[in-house]
Amino acid sequence: MKLQIEGQSLRVRIGEAELAQLLAGHAVESHTHLALGLSMGCALRLVAGNVAQLSGRPDAWQIELPGSAVREHAARLPTREGLTFTLPTGHGDDTLELLFDVDVRDSVRQRRSS
């Protein structure tokens, strides 16, 4: 899982193996040790309903994506289009744009070489 933060935008990009893990009902987790005593973790899960959410602590994020939207997206792969969710931040009118996509470059290469 790769996380990219820019301003009020958070991009979550996973590979096809991680997508299979999500679709099987398991969380995808990532942990990074930045320095002594400083680390960050993120868990990505599918949930019922059609609302994405971001919660947790500064060092342990929980990202929940609507399972039905992710399954529909998976059925359209390979595609360059991802899923976009707009999340309230609790700071006035500020929102966070959550982008989710699946890196399919490896399987596209395999399909082309076969």
Image (cartoon, rainbow, N blue to C red):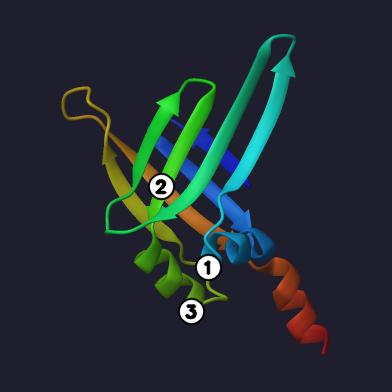
Q: What's the residue type where badge 3 is placed?
A: Ala
Q: Residues within 10 Å of mark 3 (few under 14, many from 20)?
A: few
Considering only vertical position in the picture, is 81 above or below 51?
below
User: Which residue does the image show at 65% across and 68% down from the upper left?
Assistant: 104
Q: Residue furthest left?
A: 92
Q: Residues within 10 Å of mark 1 (few under 14, many from 20)?
A: few
Classify residue 49 by image quadrant.
bottom left
Q: Which residue is mark 3?
A: 75
What x and y, as percent, mark residue 7?
A: 42, 30
Q: What's the residue type where badge 1 is placed?
A: Arg
User: Which residue does the image show at 53% across and 66% down from the upper left?
Assistant: 23
Name the image quarter holding the C terminus: bottom right
Label 1 or label 3, whichever comes before in sequence order: 3
Judge left or right: residue 8 versus residue 22.
left
Q: In this rendering, which labeled residue sits more in front, label 1 or label 2? A: 2
Q: Residues within 10 Å of mark 2 (few under 14, many from 20)?
A: some
What x and y, as percent, mark residue 3?
A: 57, 40
Q: Could you tell me how many numbered marks the image carries?
A: 3
Give SS at disc 3: helix
Q: What's the residue type where badge 2 is placed?
A: Glu
